[in-house]
Amino acid sequence: MAYITERKEFYGRDFIVNPSVLIPKPDTEILVYRGIEIISKKLQENLQVKFVDLCTGSGCVAVSLWKELESSFDVDKMIFFATDISPDALSIAKQNCSFHQCDIEFLLCDLLQAKELVGLDGIISNPPYVPNEIATKLLKDGRSEPLLALDGDCNGSVDGTGLIARLLSQGFEKLNPGGFILLETGEYNAELTAKLMEQNGFADIRIHADLSGMLRVVEGWKPHEL
C-alpha cells in the first residue's frame, strides 16, 4: 500500500517512498530515539558535531534526527551527512529532505568512502543486514523492496554481517576518539554485530531492543585513548 500511495509515516512524519527504497518500519524508530539522546548530549558539550547517516534509503532516519534536534538546538552546530550507494534512493532522500526543510548534505558513495567523511563524531545506520538466503525468500511475497537494501552478505558472509563488518572497520578509522556508532541489525545477528564491534576496537557496547522486545540496535564507542 505504501508503494501505491508513495507515502509512509515514520516517527510522526510522512515520507515519500517508491520501490527504490525500503518502506520505513516502526522497528527503526529506536535507532532514531537513541541517536537523538546521544547527539543531544554531544551538542550540549561541544561547539559543533559532525555525523552521518549511512545507507540512508528514503532518508527517514536522517530527516527525523534533524527535525527532532532542530527543535532544541542551534542547527549551525550540526554538520550532517547522509549517504547511499543507490542514485535512485538518494533522489528520494533528497526529496524528503526538501519536503521537511532540513539542511543535510547527501553523498553518493559506498559506505564511508567519500572524502568528506572524516573526523566524525557519530555514525548512524540502518544498513543491509539480512542474510542473502532470507532476503531472497522475503522478496518472493511480492513486496517489491530492493534486494540491495536488504542483503547484508558480501565478501563470502552468509549471516548478514558482511557489509556490517566492512562498515565497522571503516567506521572506527573515520570516527574521532569518543565518537559513537549506532547500527540497526536483525534479531538474528545483533549479538554477532556486537562481537564484531569489539573485534574492531569499539568499547561500551550495548544492544537495544525494539518495542517488540527484539534485539535491534547495537551501540559502540571509540575509546578516548587508544
Image (tube, rainbow, N blue to C red):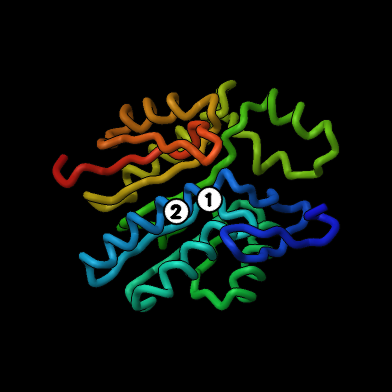
What is the number of the mark on residue 222?
Answer: none
Q: Are marks 2 and 1 in contact (CB under 8 Å)?
A: yes
Quarter the C terminus occupies: top left
Point 34% across, 78% down: residue: 74
Residue 97, image x and y in percent? 59, 70
Residue 65, image x and y in percent? 47, 62
Q: Quadrant of residue 59?
A: bottom right
Instruction: Please determine whether, in this image, residue 61 is positioned above or below residue 157.
Output: below
Q: Residue furthest front?
A: 212
Q: Which residue is the site of mark 2?
A: 33
Q: Judge from the rendering whether residue 51 lies leftward or rightward of residue 91; answer left or right.
A: left
Judged from the image, the secondary structure of the residue bearing numbered disc 1 is helix
Residue 2, image x and y in percent? 78, 55
Amino acid on which the number 1 mark rests in the picture: Glu
| The one of 111 and 97 positioned closer to us in this rendering | 97
Compute the Cα span from label 2 to label 1.
Answer: 6 Å
Q: Judge from the rendering whether residue 202 lies leftward or rightward of residue 55; answer left or right.
A: left
Point 70% across, 52% down: residue: 21
Q: Quadrant of residue 52?
A: bottom left
Q: Which residue is the site of mark 1?
A: 29
Point 78% across, 52% down: residue: 19
Point 44% across, 53% down: residue: 33
